[in-house]
Amino acid sequence: MNPSPKPNRNFMLCRHLRTKMMYLPMEEPDYFSSTTASFWCLRTLKVVGPDDGPVCAHDCCNPTRTCYENDAVPARPPVA
């Protein structure tokens, strides 16, 4: 079985992305090294974001998502 690809690290993770690995004390955090990591969104508290897209490290680095937010990029209003 091939390991899953690393997320796009050209972008920062969305500030609402969470995984249990974030709550472990680590000198150099690597939230993506676990093959059993479960991710959720703090805005929905589910495995889908407000845009109904999947919540995972691969997709939550994407600033084109309407719900994507980090310290430098605020979320865009949804398109009606």
Image (cartoon, grey):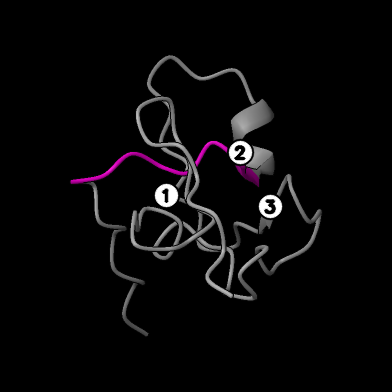
| Distance (Cα) linking label 1 and label 2 | 9 Å
Q: Residues within 10 Å of mark 1 (few under 14, many from 20)?
A: few
Residue drawn at x 69%, y 55% as measured from the top left? 40
| Residue 72 against residue 80 in the figure, above or below | above
Q: Position of residue 14 (x, y in %)?
A: 48, 43
In terms of sequence position, does the residue under pointer 1 or pointer 2 come before the other? 2
Q: Which residue is mark 2?
A: 21
| Distance (Cα) linking label 3 and label 2 | 14 Å
Q: Position of residue 8 (x, y in %)?
A: 25, 56
- The range drawn in magenta is 10-18
Residue 30 relative to residue 52: left or right: left
The amino acid beneath tag 2 is Met
Residue 58 relative to residue 49: left or right: left
In this view, the mark in front (1 or 3): 3
62 in magenta: no
**The quarter of the displayed image where residue 53 is located:** bottom right
In terms of sequence position, does the residue under pointer 1 or pointer 3 come before the other? 1
Residue drawn at x 55%, y 55% as measured from the top left? 77
Q: Which mark is residue 33?
A: 1
Instruction: Give the dominant element type of the magenta stretch: helix, strand or loop.
Output: loop
Relative depth, front residue between 13 and 2: 13
Q: Position of residue 58 (x, y in %)?
A: 39, 63
Q: Which residue is mark 3?
A: 41
Relative depth, front residue between 38 and 78: 78
| Count of marks, rendered view | 3
- Circles 1 and 2: CB distance less than 8 Å? yes
The amino acid beneath tag 3 is Cys
The amino acid beneath tag 1 is Ser
